[in-house]
Image (cartoon, rainbow, N blue to C red):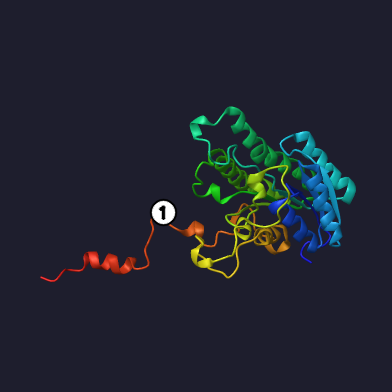
């Protein structure tokens, strides 16, 4: 087991990517602290971990409130005796879900996005480091996004927060490395849960956008990599597991796209299948 004898705290662990990571980390031997602003979701996810033979603790906390995330870290140490992995995963989309023009974004909406996506990551890392530094070891993961690399229409505030996460991770790798603490970010592109856009109060779906969209046809998928199944939550969780495990012992300060399938490698221009023929034809001397 890749996480045997480890304790992992996962924020936003009650649904989507966080819940799937909680289940996977537990399968790999970790004891899990499921933190979520929705207390029932946290309890349900922890119960699911235990139903599958793992050990879990549910904690209700708003990660953007420092006292609450500090208490969650303390609860992890009190209950399990240690904290080895902090997965700062909790995040929210921009209010309006991309439908609000930038100039119409209110200060309240802007700060709401920063509250979870920046403050929450900052407080999670800060209090994990408080526990990890004396032990001179630890692993920290933050959830970034492909929106930190390329433009997502209407997702201005969200993209800004994820760019900030990337910069924080890279900078802290220099400072924390001296204490044996690694810090990285995972940046999903595909294979994420619709719960992210639905917010609180909706049932936990447990599947990716692509899985709930209907029968999978790779030929019409915009993802360059053509596989016979859609990307799923486990695809992203597997990358988080790699970053949490000793298999990435010398990986730090990295922002790793987890499910881009070649999407991030594309240029903006559209190349038709016969692009080379057309290009050569344009420069080949015509018959005189």
**Residue at image point 52% right, 50% down:** 149
Q: Position of residue 111 (x, y in %)?
A: 62, 32
Q: Residue furthest front?
A: 214
The quadrant the C terminus occupies is bottom left
Query: Considering only vertical position in the picture, is 80 above or below 116?
Result: below
**Residue at image point 71% right, 45% down:** 202
Res 236 quadrant in image: bottom right
The foreground one among 86 and 93 is 93
Q: How many residues crowd around disc 1 within 10 Å: few (fewer than 14), some, or many (20 or more)? A: few
The foreground one among 47 and 183 is 47
Q: Which residue is mark 1?
A: 268
- Numbered-mark total: 1
Q: Is residue 83 visible?
A: no
Query: Considering only vertical position in the picture, is 133 above or below 251?
Result: above
The foreground one among 61 and 196 is 196
Q: Position of residue 195 (x, y in %)?
A: 67, 48
Left-right relation of 78 to 233: right
Q: Position of residue 233 (x, y in %)?
A: 67, 58
Q: Position of residue 12 (x, y in %)?
A: 73, 46
Left-right relation of 167 to 68: left
The quadrant the N terminus occupies is bottom right
Q: Is residue 17 visible?
A: yes
Q: Secondary structure at mark 1?
A: loop
**Residue at image point 78% right, 46% down:** 35
**Residue at image point 65% right, 41% down:** 117
Q: Residue furthest top?
A: 107
């Amino acid at each position: 087991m890749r996480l045997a004898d480890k304790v992992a705290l996962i924020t936003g662990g009650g649904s989507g990517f966080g819940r799937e990571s909680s289940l996977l980390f537990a399968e790999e031997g970790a004891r899990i602290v499921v933190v979520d602003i929705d207390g029932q979701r946290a309890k349900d996810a922890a119960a699911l971990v235990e139903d599958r033979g793992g050990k879990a603790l549910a904690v209700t906390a708003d990660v953007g409130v420092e006292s609450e995330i500090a208490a969650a870290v303390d609860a992890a140490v009190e209950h399990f005796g240690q904290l080895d992995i902090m997965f700062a995963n909790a995040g929210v989309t921009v209010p309006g879900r991309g439908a609000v023009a930038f100039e119409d974004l209110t200060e309240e909406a802007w700060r709401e996005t920063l509250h979870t996506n920046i403050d929450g990551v900052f407080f999670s890392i800060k209090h994990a480091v408080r526990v990890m530094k004396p032990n001179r070891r630890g692993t920290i993961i933050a959830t970034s996004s492909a929106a930190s690399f390329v433009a997502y229409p209407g997702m201005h505030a969200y993209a800004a927060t994820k760019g900030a996460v990337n910069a924080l991770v890279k900078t802290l790798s220099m400072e924390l490395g001296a204490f044996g603490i690694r810090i990285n970010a995972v940046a999903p592109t595909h294979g994420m849960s619709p719960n992210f856009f639905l917010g609180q109060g909706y049932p936990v779906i447990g599947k990716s956008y692509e899985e709930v969209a209907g029968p999978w046809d790779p030929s019409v998928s915009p993802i360059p990599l053509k596989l016979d199944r859609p990307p799923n939550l486990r695809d992203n969780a597997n990358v988080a597991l790699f970053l949490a495990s000793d298999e990435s012992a010398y990986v730090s300060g990295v922002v790793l796209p987890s499910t881009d399938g070649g999407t991030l490698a594309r240029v903006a221009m559209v190349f038709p299948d016969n692009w080379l023929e057309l290009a050569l034809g344009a420069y080949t001397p015509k018959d005189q």
